Amino acid sequence: MESTVWLASRSLPRPGVGCCNLLSRVRRSGGRLKPCGNGRKVVVCVSGTEGKTKVVIVGGGVGGLAVGGRLAKEGYDVHILEKNSHVGGRLQSLEVEAAVGVGGKSDDPGGQECFRFDTGPSLLLLPQKYRDAFTAMGEDMDDYVTLKKVEPAAYRVFFGEDEGVQSLDLLYDVQKMCLQLEQVEEGAGGAFLRFLANAKEALDKGTASFIERDFKSFWDYADVPRLLPLLKHLSPIELLGQHHSTMRNYFKNPKLQAMFTFQDLYVGLTPYNAPGVFSLLAATELTDGVWYPVGGFAKVRDGLAQAAQKVGATITTKATVKRIDHANGQVQGVTLEDGTFMRANIVVANADLPYVYNSLLGSKVKTQASKLLSSKYSASVIAFQWALSSRLERLSHHNVFLSNCYEESWHRATDASTILERPNFYVHAPSRTDSTVCPLGTDAITVLLPVAHLGEGFSIGSASDDKQIVEAARERVISSLVRSGIGDISSMILSEVVYSPPTWQDSYNLQYGAAFGLAHNLLQLAYFRPDVAEPSIKGLYFAGASTRPGNGVPLVLMGAKVTTNRILEENYPFLSGN
Ligand SMILES: Cc1cc2nc3c(=O)[nH]c(=O)nc-3n(C[C@H](O)[C@H](O)[C@H](O)COP(=O)(O)OP(=O)(O)OC[C@H]3O[C@@H](n4cnc5c(N)ncnc54)[C@H](O)[C@@H]3O)c2cc1C
């Protein structure tokens, strides 16, 4: 049975309070709420388990698991549907068997050994946000995941130059960091301290004012008293000016300018189109630290899934949603690819938002759908997971290789001919922190090389196009590693797994195979990023990297809280006496 109740919006619970207060009020009134003329519509369903409101979540990525767990804890009947055989979405670990042989020689076959790779996230930033996600489900993250700080540096940055400084470490130790920078440029130590203080301010104030906040109207966003604390410390030019230009106020040396701006890649931008506020990325790496989940990111995935199930959410894998059903401005449920219809009062779409609008919602939202198609997207990436017969001693846990043509290197390659001789790429070598990654004396590295996404001309006219660009990428990475003094790995590769833009699109339904979803340029940030609900379809909500606040696991986890609170404000988990 399903019933519709109207009530005045002022009696809705405050975000974060949950529904307990409201429910006790409802119970006191005998479980009945009277229709109220100017009120807001609240749908109450008693068709789910034990009369609970039924929620279907499309996608078991981080966003789906986190919202699912939070809502189940609040008393909703939650069903998470995931198309793949594993939940976790982009957050995955992959185990590969390879023959290492005696003495680590691939041509001397020995037993098969296991090598582990994190195919998605590898940097665990803002660990408190992970803890909060478990706490919200009544669980302690330490019971599921052991975090280890990546020491002594967040990153090692290699510069693709033949002369001068070859590499620098992003050290947590401020004194050592200043000494290191002073050797590159006189006065850079002091400049670094100023940079760090300002970036930390942007991080602390920006998180509260922009990232964790639910913007229900433009006025929430343009709320001057809320912005004042941020503006008091930082000028609008520092916050909104071109990131690379703002960095010139601190450092003259292009290597140092690059060292504190390459992080813009994570948010789908470049130092030449990102606003200066994204210095907060380097700030969190250097102050909160970079962490690693021992046993790989799969531990985070499994922990979130187990915690959500413990509070009552059900998870079904290999369940592809074909359509989100809605009629008369109200969500009805979902239809699976096998034709099964699942009725629900609330649907939370965790799959990539542009894909949801364009493939699951039908023609009613076609204006929003086509607007999303022409929005700005992050890069895609070609990823190599290589099991190596020897350990690469010069590598740190996280390594960034920057091009000698820094500005040019941000143009996204579309085919083999447009990959630079010395491209920017990232190398993850987690065995420095976690000895369970690969056998002693060997290495397991993941390389991420940014390229164009499928909507901006990445060449897949034929399978051979894809093959050519992958071959060019492999060749450029290997020769860059040689030039940087890491060693020639071509004879060390025991096994290789490759992901290219079509892999990201096909595996997770990411629009255009853009690995990090919608970009975070100023017109796609905060209030201007797609909202966590679709106003024309009641009961339809969103969670994940392409909605607010944005990409990256901590942001998706913060967004899960925003989505949950919005649902709590607008819907009851159940209604006794109905
Ligand atoms: C290569 C790479 C490196 C990254 N590195 C980092 C990092 O170091 N640190 C960090 O914090 N973040 C990193 N990220 C970003 C991070 O992975 C994402 O922000 C986050 O995992 C996104 O989670 P999500 O829940 O929004 O979406 P997704 O992970 O995309 O989950 C959505 C889920 O929906 C499922 N789905 C899609 N369509 C359907 C359908 N029709 N029916 C049912 N299910 C469906 C998908 O299979 C998927 O499981 C990285 C991402 C990539 C790709």
Image (cartoon, helix red, strand yellow):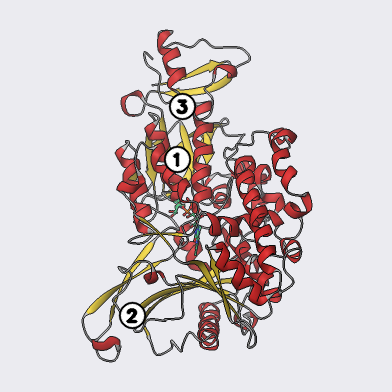
The answer to which of 200 and 370 lies nearer the viewer is 200
Judged from the image, the secondary structure of the residue bearing numbered disc 2 is: loop
Judged from the image, the secondary structure of the residue bearing numbered disc 1 is: helix
Task: Name the kind of residue labelled 1 in the image.
Answer: Val
Residue in view at x 42 percent, y 26 percent: 573
Task: Name the kind of residue labelled 2 in the image.
Answer: Thr
Task: Name the kind of residue labelled 3 in the image.
Answer: Gly
Query: Which one is earlier in the sequence, the residue at label 2 or at label 1?
Result: 1
Judged from the image, the secondary structure of the residue bearing numbered disc 3 is: loop
Foreground mark, 2 or 3? 2
Q: Is residue 124 visible?
A: yes
Q: Is residue 339 above or below residue 188?
A: above
- Residue indicated by mark 1: 67
Query: Which one is earlier in the sequence, the residue at label 3 or at label 1?
Result: 3
Query: Would residue 285 appear left or right of 237 to someone viewing this image?
Result: left
- Residue indicated by mark 3: 18
For residue 442, which numbered disc appears in the image?
Answer: 2
Q: CA distance from mark 2 to mark 1?
A: 39 Å
> Quadrant of the rendered structure where residue 438 is?
bottom left
How many circles with numbers are drawn on the protein?
A: 3
Tag 3–tag 1 contact (CB < 8 Å): no
The answer to which of 436 and 89 lies nearer the viewer is 436
Q: CA distance from mark 3 to mark 1?
A: 13 Å
Look at the image and tell me in which quarter the C terminus lies: top left
Residue in view at x 48 percent, y 59 percent: 290
Query: Would residue 400 appear left or right of 112 to someone viewing this image?
Result: right
Q: CA distance from mark 2 to mark 3?
A: 50 Å
Foreground mark, 2 or 1? 2
> Quadrant of the rendered structure where residue 165 is?
bottom right
